Image (cartoon, rainbow, N blue to C red):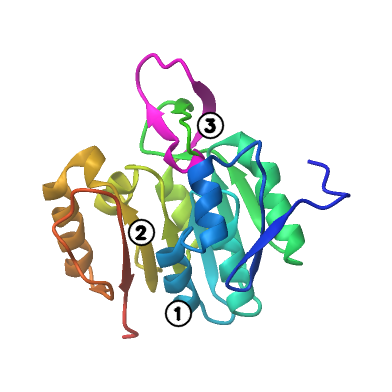
Amino acid sequence: MDDTTGPETVKLGPVRVPILPSLVSPMIEKGLRKGWYEFEERRAIASAVRKGDRVLDLGGGIGVCAATAALTAQDIRLTIVEANPALHDAIRLTMRLNGIADYELLSGAVSLTSARTTRLELGEHYWAAREVYGPSDNSVEVPILPPGPLLERVRPDVLVCDIEGNERGLIETCDLSSVRCFIVELHPDIYGGGTSEALDAKLLRDGFRRVTEWAAPSSPQVQHYHRDAG
């Protein structure tokens, strides 16, 4: 991606974000310009990240949440995972625009699928790309990143997760003992409101407290969980 002439940018909090017409739909562009793009996630990240934290961002998008984390506190160790290969250059550009050089960018879908690759269905809005198991007219083959080994390697203090339904398997099966703050978008539109409530209950049993208010879920909602020291 050539940004020598400089793309148009907007500010979301401290983060400079490029407007990339080739990638962003009109709805996403409106969210960027109006300031509501990833607002709940950005607010939670700004309150959660501390100096020296290990931050793992699953579903990096164009890098807004990751850049927010990097600009919130010093000396963080940042790992970004994004399944859609078309967004990787956008993430690198967002990082560059904000003077962020120290990060790891991984390509793949975070999934419990046993295969080595999966199909990622791409929609009008890049934030809705999701794993599919049947024929799709608009999809791309991507590598699988099993969440368990990834979490074991990174051992994040702060985990940001927007992976279009695959958070279910992560919450149900993975060891989150290293995680102090968990910022997750739940997707009851994919697996049902009852499952969302069960995932919330499991996190509470596992020692997290929910910072955000709970509403009977029927559409995607961002929840922020925190584990107190000791």
Would you name the residue on which mark 3 appears?
143
In the picture shown, does residue 154 fall above or below 7? below
Q: Is residue 228 visible?
A: yes
Q: Position of residue 63 (x, y in %)?
A: 60, 55
**Could you say which is closer to the camera, residue 112 or residue 90?**
90
Whichever of labels 3 and 1 marks the residue nearer the N terminus, that label is: 1
Q: Which mark is residue 47?
A: 1
Residue, disc 2: 184
- Measured in 3D between alpha carbons, the distance from the residue under mark 3 to the one under mark 1, in whole angstroms, is 33 Å
Sooner in the amino-acid sequence: mark 1 or mark 2: 1
Find out whether residue 113 is within the magenta segment.
no
Q: Residue at x 24, y 48 (%)?
A: 219
Task: State the separation of the CA atoms marked 3 and 2.
Answer: 22 Å
Q: Amino acid at mark 2?
A: Val
Query: Do the CB atoms of the residues marked 3 and 2 lie less than 8 Å apart?
Result: no
Q: Residues within 10 Å of mark 1 (few under 14, many from 20)?
A: few
Q: Quadrant of the C terminus?
A: bottom left
The structure residue drawn at horizontal position 41% and vertical position 51%, both measured from the top left corner, is 162
Q: Which contiguous range is marked in magenta? A: 126-145
The secondary structure type at the circle numbered 3 is strand
Q: Position of residue 37 (x, y in %)?
A: 48, 58
Q: Quadrant of residue 208?
A: bottom left
Question: Where is residue 158 drawn, in percent x and y?
Answer: 46, 68
* Mark 2: few/some/many CA within 10 Å (<14, 14-19, 20+): many
Tell me the kind of residue under disc 3.
Pro
